[in-house]
C-alpha cells in the first residue's frame, strides 16, 4: 500500500522524477526569458485577462494551457507521479509571473526580486497547480486504459521484452 502511494505521488521511475524536478527551474526561467524577449508581462497579462473575461479571447492562451496540461499528462502516462507532474505544470506559470521583475507599477514602484518571486509563486499555485492536477488525472485515466489494452492484447512487459 505504501509503495502504491509513493508511486502515485513521486512516480514509478524515481530517476525520471528527479529529472522532472531538475528541469523545473529551466522551464521556469526559459518561460520567463521567452515572455521578456518576445513580448512583455503586460501583454501576456492582457491576453490572459481578455481570455478569462471573454472580452478578447487569444488562441495563444489556449495553446499555452493545452501545452502545460499535455506535458503533465504525458509525464503521468509514462511515469505517474502527482508531485512531479504538478511541478512541471507550475514551472512555466511561475516563469510568467516572475517576468514581472523590473517593471514599474503605479502604486508600488519597480518590482523587485521578492515581489516577482511572490507573484510567480502565486501564479504557479493559482494556475499551474490546477493544470498539473488536471494533467495528472487525465494521464492516470490514459495510463489505466493503456494497461487494459496491453492486458487484453497480451502486450504486457514480458511480451514487449521479447519483441525483436
Image (tube, rainbow, N blue to C red):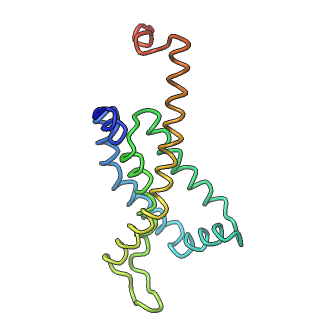
For the point 46% across and 58% down, which residue is it?
128
Give the percent coordinates (x, y) of residue 142: 54, 33
Give the percent coordinates (x, y) of residue 49: 61, 72
For the point 49% across and 62% down, which residue is it?
127
Q: Residue furthest right?
A: 55
51 or 34, which lies in front? 51
Q: Is residue 71 above or below residue 3?
A: below
Q: Is residue 83 above or below residue 51?
A: above
Image-based side of 116 in relation to 70, left or right: left
For the point 46% across and 66% down, which residue is it?
96
The count of marks equals 0
Q: Is residue 103 above or below residue 19?
A: below
Quarter of image, res 15 = top left
Give the percent coordinates (x, y) of residue 5: 33, 37
Q: Residue furthest bottom?
A: 107
Quarter holding the C terminus is top left
Quarter holding the N terminus is top left
For the point 42% across and 57% down, which residue is it?
90
Give the percent coordinates (x, y) of residue 40: 51, 72
Image-based side of 44 in relation to 136, left or right: right
Amino acid at each position: 500500500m505504501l509503495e502504491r502511494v509513493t508511486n502515485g505521488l513521486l512516480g514509478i521511475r524515481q530517476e525520471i522524477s528527479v529529472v522532472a524536478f531538475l528541469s523545473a527551474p529551466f522551464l521556469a526561467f526559459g518561460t520567463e526569458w521567452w515572455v521578456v524577449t518576445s513580448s512583455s508581462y503586460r501583454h501576456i497579462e492582457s491576453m490572459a485577462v481578455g481570455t478569462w473575461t471573454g472580452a478578447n479571447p487569444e488562441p495563444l492562451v489556449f495553446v499555452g494551457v493545452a501545452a502545460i496540461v499535455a506535458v503533465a499528462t504525458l509525464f503521468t502516462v509514462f511515469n505517474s507521479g502527482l508531485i512531479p507532474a504538478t511541478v512541471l505544470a507550475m514551472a512555466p506559470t511561475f516563469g510568467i509571473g516572475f517576468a514581472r521583475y523590473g517593471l514599474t507599477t503605479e502604486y508600488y514602484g519597480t518590482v523587485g526580486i521578492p515581489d516577482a518571486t511572490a507573484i510567480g509563486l502565486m501564479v504557479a499555485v493559482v494556475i499551474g497547480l490546477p493544470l498539473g492536477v488536471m494533467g495528472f488525472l487525465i494521464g492516470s485515466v490514459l495510463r489505466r486504459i493503456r494497461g487494459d489494452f496491453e492486458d487484453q492484447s497480451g502486450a504486457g512487459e514480458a511480451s514487449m521484452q521479447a519483441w525483436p
